[in-house]
Image (cartoon, rainbow, N blue to C red):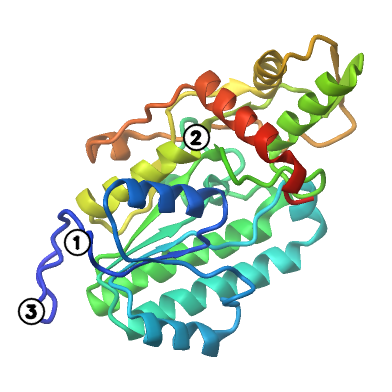
């Protein structure tokens, strides 16, 4: 992107001494980004917990930006959950996420934030999108009904970023990660996504000596999984090397069945019992594999293998099980 108001916004290494706000810095993605930025030498990171700053409160959000004056922002704050939570509370997922992202983006516009990365989700794409899913599949078909409210909020966020680019010339970008996992994930029985739910279930079964574990669905849907540390590394890379209006898919470019991921988790936690499948429960989207060609063209590929990532995550879960959410 060319200069705007005399400022050259061409992507380049970010100033390690500049104020950098990570919205949602205690969550799965935000905490990983915080660790990656610290490792990369950023010395003025800013974060607020939801109890310290309610991003649904527009006045409080604008006051925070006026006080801290960040130069860079990663918008990783969001209300997230698995199939059950999304199906049960669609109003909450739509309303909360729209308010969070609208307040942060509008405040960032008012204060002329130099670089902003908005994080969405691969659920923005149509349920039956051609696999692997390209960025231009957005808005070409019906969404998965179990999380359509959350998806619509994230689609609105993408358009908000694109609109800021068109109206104000700001070089802001959006990244759409595949299924993420890692430290600080939500492992609660009601609110977790599939992978942390499986880790908790199989770890408890291994510890209790249970002879069987029952999982939702058929186990046949295919899913792509990316460790949150890889995601964080991709985010910093994109902020320093990519500028474009299209959202960028972030993933590994390969997938496995839910049955295969369950078997791998069972192996990692040391569970040797049987696994049964409750086929009366929904499977969700049959396959969700991202085309990561655009990300590769920008110079980044995933580094952490699935089994290695699972081992790291299980170790973290066991070390922190006593004070996890839920």
Report whether 202 appears left or right of 137.
Answer: right
Give the secondary structure at mark 1. Answer: loop
| Tag of residue 227 | 2
> Is 170 or 246 nearer to us in this picture?
170
Q: Can residue 195 be seen in this view?
A: no
Vertical order, 137 against 14 (above or below): above
Is residue 211 visible to the viewer in this orientation of the structure? yes
Q: How crowded is mark 2: few (under 14 residues within 10 Å), some or many (20 or more)?
A: many
Count residues near mark 1 (Cα–Cα under 10 Å), then give few for <14, some for 14-19, many for 20+: few
Name the foreground residue: 254 vs 137.
254
Q: Name the residue under label 3.
A: 6
Element type where label 3 sits in the image? loop
Mark 3 crowd level (few <14, some 14–19, many ≥20, 10 Å Cα): few
The spot of residue 66 in percent (x, y) is: 38, 87
**Which callout, 2 or 1, points to the residue nearer the camera?**
1
Label at residue 15? 1
The answer to whether the residue labelled 2 contacts the one labelled 1, judged by CB atoms less than 8 Å apart, is: no
CA gap between label 2 and label 1 equals: 26 Å
Alpha carbon separation for disc pair 3 and 1: 18 Å
Lower position in the chain sequence, tag 3 or tag 1: 3
Q: Which quadrant of the figure has residue 49?
A: bottom right
Q: Which of marks 2 and 1 is nearer the N terminus?
A: 1
Q: Which mark is nearer the camera, 3 or 2? A: 2
Question: Given this view, does label 3 or label 1 mark the residue nearer the observer?
Answer: 1
- The quadrant in which residue 105 appears is bottom left
């Amino acid at each position: 992107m060319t200069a705007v108001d005399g400022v050259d916004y061409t992507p380049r290494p970010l100033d390690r001494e500049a104020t950098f706000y990570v919205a949602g810095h205690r969550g799965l993605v935000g905490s990983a980004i915080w660790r990656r930025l610290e490792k990369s030498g950023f010395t003025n990171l800013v974060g607020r917990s939801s109890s310290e700053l309610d991003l649904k409160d527009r006045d409080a959000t604008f006051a925070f930006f006026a006080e801290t004056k960040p130069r860079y922002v990663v918008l990783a704050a969001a209300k997230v959950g698995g199939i059950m939570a999304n199906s049960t509370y669609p109003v909450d997922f739509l309303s909360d996420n729209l308010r969070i992202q609208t307040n942060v983006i509008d405040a960032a516009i008012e204060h002329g934030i130099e670089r902003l990365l908005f994080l969405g989700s691969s659920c923005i794409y149509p349920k039956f999108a051609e696999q692997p899913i390209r960025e231009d599949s957005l808005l070409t078909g019906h969404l998965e009904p179990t999380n359509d409210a959350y998806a619509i909020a994230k689609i609105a966020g993408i358009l908000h970023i694109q609109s800021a680019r068109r109206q104000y010339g700001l070089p802001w970008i959006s990244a759409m990660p595949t299924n993420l996992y890692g430290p600080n994930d939500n492992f609660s029985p009601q609110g977790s996504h599939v992978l942390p739910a499986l880790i908790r279930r199989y770890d408890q079964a291994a510890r209790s000596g249970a002879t069987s574990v029952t999982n939702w669905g058929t186990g046949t849907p295919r899913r792509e999984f990316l460790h949150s540390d890889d995601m964080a590394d991709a985010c910093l890379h994109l902020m320093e090397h990519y500028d474009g209006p299209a959202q960028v898919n972030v993933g590994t470019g390969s997938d496995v069945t839910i049955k295969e991921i369950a078997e791998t988790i069972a192996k990692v936690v040391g569970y040797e019992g049987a696994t049964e499948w409750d086929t009366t429960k929904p499977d969700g989207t049959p396959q969700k594999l991202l085309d990561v060609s655009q990300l590769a063209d920008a110079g980044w590929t995933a580094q952490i293998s699935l089994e290695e990532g699972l081992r790291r995550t299980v170790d973290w879960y066991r070390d922190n099980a006593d004070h996890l959410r839920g």
